[in-house]
Image (spheres, rainbow, N blue to C red):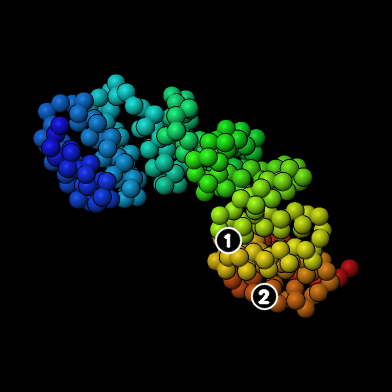
């Protein structure tokens, strides 16, 4: 084996990515076989990905094809380029690459993360049926293989059913997440789902209590803005305008151009100018 390639792989195992990059360059200089150079460039693309150098990932993959236009493990190249495009915020390019990857192989374990990431994109695009189909495909695998991934899948599937107005099924999935949560942050994400359902059911006191439960479980919860808005709106609908005002001013100060700014202002105007 190319001795510098062997050295680079040993450095990758130690997560010494910058040093590995130098070894990969030496391996390219040492190699006289184009197919081997293509393999090296494929590995270089992963090394750049580990360093969050996504533009370099794409350029490295181009070099793979330059040295071997018939490169066999194309699903791996499509996978890493899809992940790189996600890192660059180029969603449509990412979708195209990830789809090409699973068109070649959608059964092996290495492809499960591809399906997971593609499902997340569809969820973000509100393509709930497409997202749910993919999440369901890998649900059973991750239940056995990786509990953190599985809990994340439960979270997404539960919200998909919520957005599709299947509140009973949504609640079941959030309960399943809550029962199987391995830490308080995951429990908080399940309670977050309960909050949406309680608010939809106009149970505003329960909504407030659930929001407080989230903060007791995870003081650094990932969506404090939503927690603040739903608490404020619940106090508004309960007629506690004094507390609503406190939340209103806190939220407007903290999130002046936030997702709920318009809705919050409408509630404030309704309070100040009752019909």
Q: Relative to the observer, which residue lies in front, 218 or 134? A: 218
State left or right for residue 50 relative to residue 83.
left
Quadrant assignment for the N terminus = top left
Image coordinates of residue 207 in percent, x first then y, are: 75, 63
Q: Secondary structure at mark 2?
A: helix
Q: Nearer the viewer, mark 1 or mark 2?
A: 1
State left or right for residue 184 relative to residue 90.
right
Image coordinates of residue 5 in percent, x first then y, are: 18, 38
Q: Which residue is mark 1?
A: 184
State left or right for residue 63 relative to residue 266.
left
Q: CA distance from mark 1 to mark 2?
A: 29 Å
Q: Residue furthest right?
A: 275
Task: Say above or below: 74 vs 95.
Answer: above
In the figure, residue 6 lies in which quadrant?
top left
Q: Which residue is mark 2?
A: 249
Are there few (<14), some (14-19), or many (20+) residues within 10 Å of tag 2?
A: some
In the figure, residue 46 lies in which quadrant?
top left
Query: Residue 174: in sight, yes or no?
Result: no
Instruction: State the residue at coordinates (61%, 50%).
Output: 180
Mark seen at residue 174: none
Instruction: State the residue at coordinates (64%, 39%).
Output: 128
State left or right for residue 223 relative to residue 75.
right
Image coordinates of residue 90 in percent, x first then y, are: 45, 43
Q: Relative to the observer, which residue lies in front, 140 or 225? A: 140
Q: Are marks 1 and 2 in contact (CB under 8 Å)?
A: no
Image coordinates of residue 65 in percent, x first then y, are: 28, 28
Instruction: State the residue at coordinates (41%, 47%).
Output: 88
Task: Say above or below: 40 vs 230.
Answer: above
């Amino acid at each position: 084996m190319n001795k510098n390639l062997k050295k680079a792989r040993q450095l990758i195992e130690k997560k010494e990515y910058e040093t590995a990059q130098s070894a990969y360059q030496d391996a390219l200089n040492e190699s006289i076989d184009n197919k081997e150079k293509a393999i090296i460039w494929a590995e270089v693309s992963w090394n750049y990905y580990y360093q969050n150098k996504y533009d370099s990932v794409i350029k490295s993959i181009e070099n793979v094809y330059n040295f071997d236009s018939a490169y066999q493990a194309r699903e791996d190249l499509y996978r890493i380029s899809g992940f790189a495009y996600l890192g660059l915020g180029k969603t449509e390019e990412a979708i195209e690459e990830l789809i090409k990857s699973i068109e070649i192989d959608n059964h092996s374990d290495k492809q499960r993360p591809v399906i997971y990431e593609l499902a997340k994109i569809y969820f973000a695009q509100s393509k709930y049926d497409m997202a749910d189909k993919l999440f369901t495909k890998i649900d059973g695998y991750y239940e056995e293989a990786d509990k953190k991934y599985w809990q994340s899948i439960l979270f997404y599937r539960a919200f998909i059913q919520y957005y599709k107005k299947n509140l009973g099924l949504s609640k079941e999935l959030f309960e399943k997440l809550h029962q199987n949560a391995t830490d308080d942050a995951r429990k908080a994400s399940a309670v977050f789902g309960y909050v949406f359902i309680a608010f939809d059911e106009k149970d505003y006191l329960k909504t407030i209590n659930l929001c407080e439960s989230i903060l007791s479980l995870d003081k650094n919860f990932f969506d404090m803005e939503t927690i603040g808005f739903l608490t404020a709106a619940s106090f508004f609908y309960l007629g506690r305008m004094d507390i609503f005002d406190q939340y209103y001013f806190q939220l407007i100060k903290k999130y002046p151009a936030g997702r709920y700014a318009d809705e919050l202002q409408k509630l404030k105007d309704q309070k100040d100018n009752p019909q």
